[in-house]
């Protein structure tokens, strides 16, 4: 379980990531691919290109196929944090 800017993140036993913002009560749940992206972003100190390379290697895909997904995630998190 991790805490960033009031956000509580936990990976459930089924591989799904659950994000919870206690201040608003909002929850977001995503599947194993989203969980992989979240963990890669944390490991890379939120640097999208490093996370892209990490996820591409873990999923065995070309980085271009994951880059847009990671950038969209970051955009979503920025908007949610405002």
Image (cartoon, helix red, strand yellow):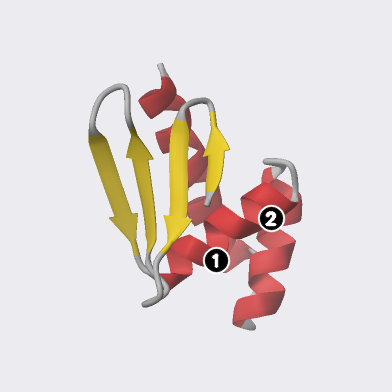
User: Residue at point 40% right, 36% down?
Assistant: 76
In the orientation shown, which residue stands out farthest toward the top? Answer: 82
Determine whether 16 is above or below 10 in the image.
below
Q: Is 56 situated left or right of 33 in this image? A: right
Drawn side of residue 73 relative to residue 57, left or right: left
Tell me which numbered mark, 2 or 1, is placed earlier along the sequence. Answer: 1
Residue displayed at 54% across by 38% down:
3
Asked whether the viewer can see residue 61, the reply is: no
Between the residue at mark 2 and the residue at mark 1, the CA separation in whole angstroms equals 9 Å
Quadrant of the rendered image containing residue 20: top left
Pointer 2 residue: 51
Q: Position of residue 28 (x, y in %)?
A: 29, 47
Q: In the displayed structure, would residue 58 be above or below residue 77?
A: below
Q: Is residue 55 above or below residue 37?
A: below
Tag 1 secondary structure = helix
Mark 1 burial class by Cα count in 10 Å: few <14, some 14-19, many 20+: some
User: Residue beneath label 1, please?
Assistant: 36
Dot 2 falls on a residue whose secondary structure is helix
Give the left or right position of residue 26, taking residue 46 as reference: left
Pick the residue in front: 75 or 24: 24
Choose top left, top right, bottom left or bottom right for residue 26: top left
Residue 43 versus residue 47: which sits nearer the camera?
A: 43
Residue 6 is marked as: none
Whether tag 2 and tag 1 are in contact, CB under 8 A, the answer is no
In the rendered image, the residue lying farthest to the left is 25
> Which quadrant holds the C terminus?
top left
Q: Position of residue 63 (x, y in %)?
A: 66, 66
* Residue at the image position 45 percent from the left and 55 percent from the top: 10
Residue at the (46%, 69%) spot, across then down: 33
């Amino acid at each position: 379980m991790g805490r960033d800017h009031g956000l509580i993140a936990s990976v459930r036993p089924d591989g799904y990531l659950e994000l919870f913002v206690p201040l608003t009560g909002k929850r977001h749940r995503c599947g194993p691919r989203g969980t992989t992206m979240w963990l890669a972003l944390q490991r890379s100190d939120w640097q999208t290109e490093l996370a892209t390379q990490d996820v591409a290697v873990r999923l065995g895909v070309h980085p271009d196929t994951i880059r847009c997904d990671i950038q969209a995630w970051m955009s979503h998190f920025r908007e949610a944090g405002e």
